Amino acid sequence: MRVLVAEDERLLADAIAEWLRDDAHAVDLAHDGASALERVTVNDYDVVVLDRDLPLVHGDDVCREIVRGGGAARVLMLTAAAEVTDRVDGLGLGADDYLTKPFAFPELAARVHALGRRCRPAAPPTLHRAGITLDPARREVFRDGRYVPLARKEFAVLAELLRAEGAVVSAEQLLEKVWDEHADPFTGAVRLTVLKLRRKLADPPVVETVKGAGYRIP
């Protein structure tokens, strides 16, 4: 998934981003509300992890703008305030979930996963196609019963191709969902990752290149 972490405590923001990237998400960072609004305008995020007390533009106003924009992004609001009224106020702004600080990173990751499922069409917990089985929860991939060890980007690309159910996924779509905003579209990162993925999945080849369009698993 593509996730924006808007948090002004830089060490905490970096720690959240690292944890979510280990879960094969593409993560962008913003350290103030103005930067968060700019990124939300430019990029299509699945989930926004939003600190309520952001500088420049308050997190409440960022949340209002996200909801007003009518996009698919789900908002997980973070705050140090643990009062029930604060949680009610945050949810009243349109946030989809609320988490008080300090929190456990596994819980935050689980909430991000749950919110991400809401912004996508319903998909089975385990993905199957062309002899491939991908389990997102366990981060395991098998082909014809053989375990296939994949790096994070390879796993995320394969998941996007399987979710497409045979449709073509463009390189631009893969960059949008698997890489973050710092990815250079001219580096060939998608092509190299698909090449490594093909090698690990072994013969017969299962990931097709559709010239001028992208990739698919028929």
Image: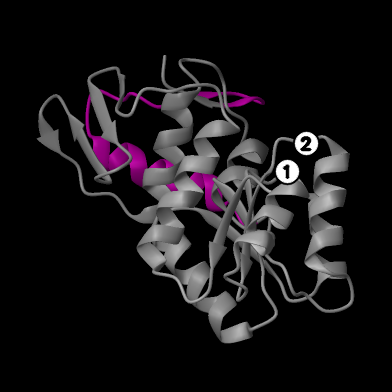
**The stretch drawn in magenta includes residue 163:** no
Residue at 43% of width from left, 44% of height from top? 156
Q: Is residue 122 left or right of residue 119?
A: left
Q: Secondary structure at mark 1?
A: loop
Q: Tell which circle, 1 or 2, labels the residue nearer the N-terminal end.
A: 1
Viewer-side label of 1, 2: 2
Residue 51 drawn at (x, y percent): 68, 68
Total labels: the figure holds: 2
Q: Residues within 10 Å of mark 1 (few under 14, many from 20)?
A: some
Q: Nearer the viewer, residue 85 or 25?
A: 85
Q: Residues within 10 Å of mark 2 (few under 14, many from 20)?
A: some
| Image: magenta residue range | 187-214
Q: Is residue 183 visible?
A: no
Colour pattern: one colour
Which residue in the structure is indicated by mark 1? 44
Residue 97 drawn at (x, y percent): 58, 50
Q: Amino acid at mark 1?
A: Asp
Residue at 64% of width from left, 37% of height from top? 173
Residue 132 drawn at (x, y percent): 25, 25
Question: Circles 1 and 2: CB distance less than 8 Å?
Answer: yes
Q: Nearer the viewer, residue 170 or 15?
A: 15
* Quadrant assignment for the C terminus: top left
Tell me the number on the disc at residue 128: none
**The stretch drawn in magenta includes residue 209:** yes
Q: Quadrant of residue 56?
A: bottom right
Q: Secondary structure at mark 2?
A: loop
Which residue in the structure is indicated by mark 2? 71
Q: Is residue 30 left or right of residue 87?
A: right
